[in-house]
Image (cartoon, rainbow, N blue to C red):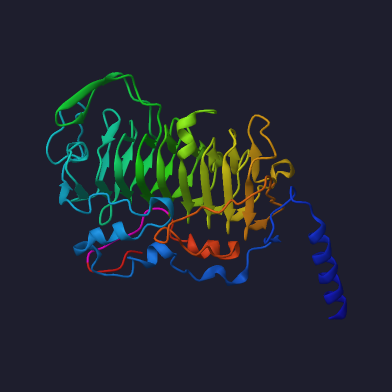
Amino acid sequence: MALLYTLASYLFFCSALVPLFSAASHTTTTGHSPPHLSKKNKNQIDACWRSNPGWASNRKRLADCAVGFGKGALGGKNGAIYTVTDPSDDAENPKPGTLRYGAILTKPLWIVFKKDMVIKLENELFMNSFKTIDGRGAKVAIAKGPCIRIHEANHVIIHGLRIHHCTRGKPGMVRRSPTHVEHRGGQDGDAITIFASSHVWIDHCKLSHSTDGLIDVVHGSTAVTISNNFFSDHNKVLLLGHQDGFDADKVMKVTVVFNRFGPHLVQRMPRVRTGYAHIANNRYDGWGIYAVGGSSNPTILSEGNYYRAPDNPKLKEVTRRVKGGSKKWNWRSSKDYFLNGAYFVQSGSGSSAPGYSPSQKFKVAKGSTVPSLTADSGTLSCFVGKPCI
C-alpha cells in the first residue's frame, strides 16, 4: 500500500509539471473504460421529456428541453400539427401531405409522420422559420438524394431523423415558400446545412455517408445546439464557419453536446473556423486525422468529453490547428477523459467560458461518465403510450 501511495504521489507530481500545451488540466487519462458505465443515465435533455409515456399527446414539450446556445429554439411550438402522409417529393410544386409542402409554409408548424417512410428528395429541402420536424413514432429517413437546408431561417428544430447518403443537388427550380420559387445551382451534398440562420436545434438524429459534410453551420449562423446525434461512416463531419477570415461567422456560437462520434469518422468533429464552440460530454470512438480542429482563431472549450484515440501511434492528438494555426488561439480542455494515449493540446489565455444565459446553462459531467450519457444517441424507438427508448 505504501508503495502504491508513493507511486501515485510521484505521478501526481509529474503531472503538475506537464506544460499547458501538452494535455488538458483537470482531466483523467487511462487505458481502460471505467467499470461502472454499463448503467445508462439520461442526460439533461432526455431527462426533460423521455420518461413521459404521454409524449405523443404532448409533443411540443420537446421544445422546452434544449440546452446551450440553441436553448430557446421554438420550432413549431406555437403552430399546428402537420402530418406527413406521402413520401414523394416535387421540388417545384410540392403536394399537400408531403414533407416539403409543410417545411416551406410561412406559418409555424410541428411536422410529424403518419408512418415509416424513406424520403428521396428531388432537390434540397428548404425549411422556413418556426418549424419542427419530429420523427418520433415512425422510422423516417431522408436518403439517396439532396437533403436539408435551413436557409435564412430562425427557430428550427430537427429531431429523430435518419439522414444518410445525401447527394449533390442538380440545377433546377426549387420552391422556398408558397409564393417564391427560384433556380438553384445544386446543393453541395451536406446532410444538414444551416446557412445565415439562428436558434436551431438538431437532436437525436443519425447521420452518415454524405457527399460533403454531415452538418455545416455557416454564413453568420448562431445560437445553435447539436445534441444526442450519432455520427458514423464519414469524412468531414461538422463544419462551423463558411471560410477562413469570413467576418460574419465571428458571431457564431454553437454547443455540441451529448453526441456520439462513432465508427469510421475521419475529421471535423467539429472543425471551427472562427467564432465560439462549446464541445461538452461527447463520446469519440476514434478518428482518422483529428477530432477537434480550427483554422481562423476560434475559441474552443472542450469540457467533459470522452476521447478514445485510434491505435495508430501517429494519431493520438485530439486537436489540429489546420493550416499551421497559432498556438495563441484560446483552446481549453477541462474534465475531459482520455483513453488509448489521446491528448488535447491546449493554448491561449483568458476565459473560454461560454457565457451562457441562466436558461442556457447545464451541468457538464466528468468525461468518464459520457458513455452512459450518450448511450441512446441517434434515433429512438418511440411507441404511443410508452416512454421513448
In the image, residue 262 sits, relative to residue 87, either above or below, namely below
Write down the region rendered in magenta: 378-384
In the image, residue 348 sits, relative to residue 29, either above or below, namely above
Q: Is residue 40 magenta?
A: no
Q: Quadrant of residue 125?
A: top left
Q: Which quadrant of the rendered structure holds the N terminus?
A: bottom right
In the image, residue 96 sits, relative to residue 71, either above or below, namely above
Q: Residue at x 60, y 52 (%)?
A: 351
Left or right: 373, with 26 as reference point: left
Q: Residue at x 62, y 41 (%)?
A: 290
Provide residue 91's location: percent of width, then percent of height: 22, 28
Provide residue 86's location: percent of width, then percent of height: 16, 41
Q: Is residue 382 magenta?
A: yes
Q: Main secondary structure of the magenta part?
A: loop
Provide residue 222's location: percent of width, then percent of height: 41, 42
Q: Which quadrant of the rendered structure holds the C terminus?
A: bottom left
Furthest-left residue in view?
A: 96
In the image, residue 30 sits, relative to residue 138, either above or below, namely below
Furthest-front residue in view?
A: 350
Provide residue 45's location: percent of width, then percent of height: 39, 62
Q: Which of 194/260 is in front?
A: 194
Q: Residue at x 17, y 38 (%)?
A: 105
Left or right: 86, with 306 as reference point: left
Residue 215 visible (yes or no)? yes
State how many labels appear.
0
